[in-house]
Amino acid sequence: MFIRLENVNYTYNLNMPFETVALNNINLEIEKGEFIGLIGHTGCGKTTLIQHLNGLLTPTSGKVYIEGIDICQKGVNLKLIRQKIGLVFQYPENQLFEENIFEEIAFGPRKLGLTEEEIKKRVYEVLEMVDLDVSYTERSPFSLSGGEMRRIAIASILSLKPQMLVLDEPTANLDPQGRSKILSEIKNIHDHYGITILLVSHNMEKIAEMVERLLVMNKGKIILDGSPREIFSRHAEQLIDIGLGLPQVTQCFYELKKRGKSIKEGVLTVEEAEREVLKKIKALANNLQK
Amino acid sequence: MIKIKNLSHIYNIPRRDPIIALKEINLEIERGEFLTIIGSNGSGKSTLARHINGLLLPTSGDVWVKGMNTKDRECLWKIRQEVGMVFQNPDNQIVATTVEDDIAFGLENMGIDRENMLERVNWALQVVGLEEYRRFEPHLLSGGQKQRVAIAGVIAMHPSFLILDEPTAMLDPRGRKEVIEVIKKLNQEEGITVIFITHLMEEVIESNRVVVLNKGEIALNGKPKDIFLKVDALRSFALDIPQITELAFRLNHKGLKNISPSTLKVEEMVEQLCLYV
Ligand SMILES: Nc1ncnc2c1ncn2[C@@H]1O[C@H](COP(=O)(O)OP(=O)(O)OP(=O)(O)O)[C@@H](O)[C@H]1O
Ligand SMILES: Nc1ncnc2c1ncn2[C@@H]1O[C@H](COP(=O)(O)OP(=O)(O)OP(=O)(O)O)[C@@H](O)[C@H]1O
Ligand SMILES: [Mg+2]
Ligand SMILES: [Mg+2]
């Protein structure tokens, strides 16, 4: 087992007037090589949860194991864990700090002790992945547009080549093309290098398209854990109820079903929806001929 | 009315080539419009928005708000009151420990008297639908509710124009819906002119007009249903069409002529598909 969370609870401002219970008895196991999505309403605890995976937060109670090691013990090398598990922050401005973008992206690889040559290679490689040209390298990360900043934040974690990538709303502020491009790069490194991915997102369309396993949180708890197809079909009502939704095409088929049409449930992508509609029409036409 | 004439904006960076963020923009925004601005990352949307309330001044060209030029220092205070702005991060915009104090904050700075203030706070709370939450601590609210508090704080100042720069980027589906509903209501019932920036194509469909920026220039300008027919052009600007519009587009091309390629909403699609399946 790569990661195991056991009865994890987390409360902000414990025993103070503004006490907030953010995680409520979380149990979770993640295997190497999984591609997981995490969804949940705003404030349900997603960011709090993922900050436990690399020791940015330690549980109020409960245990976090990474490769069998309890990371909350004294003397654990958190630096090493943060190299293994790269976390892209939800708000990129909280992650950026260097004077120029080259240094920003080179920061991690430099800490890894790579040669200047290798560092340079990595910087250019990840810039390409986030679709920014080399002219950006000399610019300050603070003179960028929102989406450009997001791209740099993602690039600087990719440059570490971690074993696991945890991305907190990576596609917020990206333009549609950037969204597709960066997610497909992430899918690529997952498929080719077996990198474990945990993707936190409010974008139901992309989640449905990308992930193999989906976790749904509500008020500090994990309430569903399954394949996106299963969750978006069998638990559609519950998702809507807790403030989430369905991808547009899934929603469309869900409404058709509600109107008594016999049509497949849990359709997740445009391609699939198109196929289903055409198949259905063909079947109806064949029936008419008979 | 907002009038933008030959607006260019250049960011100068020490020891580097300057960045031309806006090039010769000409745009008029009428009273009562609900205008959406879309465009790729770095296309100049936020730069344009910041010119409308005078946070940035043109490198060349002019911006007038109700006849006041943003370059005229004496008008700046008045312009800032006419043009309210809401940003992306719900947490960064909240300043007080209760919802009502948060909404009153801007009014206090304006020197509005107590009675008037109360009236405005009540009105703003009612418009965004948060009356029951007036004594709540903002941090206990959902993201969508926090954004509605931010919107309430801005509209309490009675601006004629409301600019929202990716206000839904960090919200869950319900929060996004709540914010869009509130914006629509402000526009239709309170007559506030809305300028809305988003990267989510399905959010564009509620507006009267869409302006597409590409590399600092206006590339397209029209009604949502006309703009979304220009699939290839949009893609060349790093944009896309909503998922349901894409499905409609594909089915129409497969010969299902009763499915309009400018289908923008799931409900429309459901109605049309009922004819076939
Ligand atoms: N630094 C903090 N201090 C106090 N409370 C906090 C802090 N950070 C988060 N919280 C609270 O903890 C709860 C969980 O927050 P968290 O940020 O983990 O949610 P989230 O699921 O990531 O939400 P979003 O979708 O808005 O990013 C919320 O009620 C939030 O207000
Ligand atoms: N303070 C600044 N200094 C220098 N250049 C800047 C500054 N702010 C923005 N830019 C540059 O100006 C261009 C336009 O930026 P702007 O923020 O207006 O884009 P945007 O359309 O809002 O993008 P996004 O969708 O990513 O928010 C970009 O190329 C950006 O790098
Ligand atoms: Mg979060
Ligand atoms: Mg912007």
Image (spheres, coloured by chain):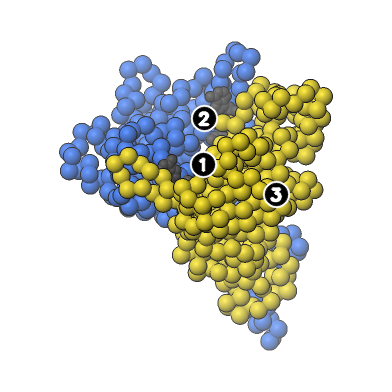
Chain colours: A blue, B yellow
Q: Nearer the viewer, residue A289 or B209?
A: B209
User: Which amino acid, mark 2?
Assistant: Thr
- Mark 1 or 2: the one toward you: 1
Q: Position of residue A136 (x, y in %)?
A: 33, 47
Residue A194, above or below B26: above
Q: Are marks 3 and 2 on the same chain?
A: no
Secondary structure beneath dot 3 equals strand
Q: Residues within 10 Å of mark 2 (few under 14, many from 20)?
A: many
Residue A263, above or below A31: below
Q: Would you name the residue on which mark 1 appears?
A: B56
Q: Position of residue B185 (x, y in %)?
A: 76, 47
Label 2: chain letter: A
Q: Are marks 1 and 3 on the same chain?
A: yes
Residue B193 got which mark? 3
Q: Would you name the residue on which mark 2 appears?
A: A48
Q: Nearer the viewer, residue B115 or A65?
A: B115
Label 3: chain letter: B
Kindly indicate whether the residue at mark 2 contacts the one at mark 3 (C-beta within 8 angstroms).
no
Q: Residues within 10 Å of mark 1 (few under 14, many from 20)?
A: some
Badge 1 residue CB within 8 Å of ligand 2:
no
- Mark pair 1, 2: CA separation: 36 Å
Secondary structure beneath dot 2 equals helix
Residue A168, above or below A77: below
Q: Residue at x 80, y 35 (%)?
A: B123
Residue B109, above or below A194: above
Q: Nearer the viewer, residue B149 or A245?
A: B149
Dot 1 or dot 3: first in sequence order is: 1
Q: Position of residue A262 (x, y in %)?
A: 70, 66
